[in-house]
Amino acid sequence: MPTRLFLLFLLAASALPLAAQTRPATDPLAREIETRMTDVMPKVIAWRRDIHQHPELSFEETRTAALVAAHLRALGLEVQAPVGKTGVVGILRGGRPGPVVALRADMDALPVTEQVDLPFKSTVRTMYNGSEVGVMHACGHDNHVAILMGVAEVLTGMKPRIPGTVKFIFQPAEEGLGGAKAMIADGALENPRPSAIFGLHVFPGELGSISTRPGGLLAAADGLNIIVKGRQTHGSAPWSGVDPIIVSAQILLGLQTIASRQINVTAAPGVITVGMIQGGNRGNIIPDSVVMVGTIRTFDAAMRAEIHTRIKRTAESIAHSAGATAEVSIATGGLITQNDATLLDQMTPTLQRSAGNGGFRIVNPITGSEDFPEFTRDIPGVFFMLGGSPTGSDPATQPANHSPLFFVDEGALPTGVRALANLAVDYLRKSGVAQ
């Protein structure tokens, strides 16, 4: 697999000039974006490779933030840093009056050891939760940062013709550590305040495709922790104690009936996953307790609350029936990534043009999670997925985000730059003063 991916990488790199081309744009500003992209894309590729080779964990993105801030300052933009510990905000004030729009990219990597054999493969190692681990951009945020740096350069070159203001938000700690909240608390959405925000995320999809949907695109993610307490005894005489392992197994099966039998799956999907179980240390000792850790994914606020209630009731009741106890704690995570339907409808022609013929699609909800909706609590936003699977591959068989084999074909990057640049310009024109 690594060798094949490296060959695909070489092919993709050689095809980048073609990947950056679409049907000729008829609008003058859209044409100018295409022209400026020709000069910018080699830099975007170089930034992406550099950031990929030097990944940094959440709230440790000092090198990445410095690279971004230096680039924005070199463009002559107003730069605010640090914002939200290690975040960066750049402000481009256009040469014509108009509203304010924001574009967001996340910067952090994951504690994953890379197994993709690339010339710019990460060899970074660090300490995480008391253990030495590899660090990798296994979720593709290196692509997001490079794309937005490229958009900033493209739009800065068009400054006299930009009808309004563009805020470039480079966010730390998207991976579950509250980076969006930290930036907002530090004023990332103020002075000036945007009236809309756009963001993207790479994933294993058809190369250069754009996938989204009105309403709930990505799930809310809540943390689940269950401690089952029994009574320790010898494994040869289970009747002399209370076996928390058997009880935990019954709870695991019971939890699955919530999603399959107790909620209306025609209204919205729900997922309950237990990804870790810890209990016992010998085969002939029934332990005193078992710990289960998992995740809950939902797309509807009322269903989210109902699932929480049913999980607690199911675990406690099953444990009680066996003479054990179950302590259930649910850590409420992020919000549902809700695309504003009106804004998405308004900007769909832009996304269709950016993706090219057949490249734009409305998809089913995706059970991954994001903290982008922290930015859309009070302002409308649109989030979309950018396909990064190599040409000729089956996206369904490609390693998923967070895998040590996760790979993004750089042929997707021009679509990302094109889409965000055109979204910013088209939104400012459509929402601003009459042209």
Image (tube, rainbow, N blue to C red):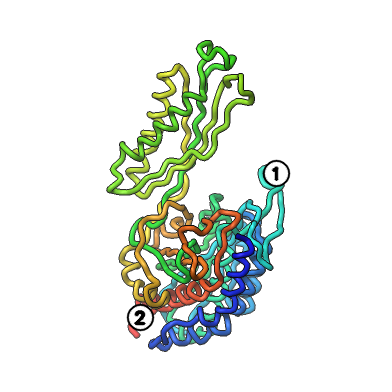
Residue 176, x across and y down, in percent = 54, 50
The correct choice, above or below, for 404 with respect to 435 in the image is: above
Q: What residue type is labelled 2?
A: Val
Mark nearer the N terminus (1 vs 2):
1
Residue at (51% x, 17% y) in the render: 242
So how many labels did they put on this image? 2
The correct choice, above or below, for 420 with respect to 54 in the image is: below
Find disc 1 in the rendering and name its residue. Answer: 131
Residue 138, x across and y down, in percent = 58, 57
Q: Which amino acid does label 1 sit on?
A: Ser
Find disc 2 in the rendering and name its residue. Answer: 433
Q: Is residue 189 visible?
A: no
The correct choice, above or below, for 9 with respect to 303 in the image is: below
Separation (CA) of disc 1 from disc 2 = 56 Å
- At mark 2, the secondary structure is loop
Residue at (42% x, 25% y) in the render: 316
Q: Can residue 376 be seen in this view?
A: yes
Residue at (40% x, 72% y) in the render: 359
The correct choice, above or below, for 332 with respect to 81 in the image is: above
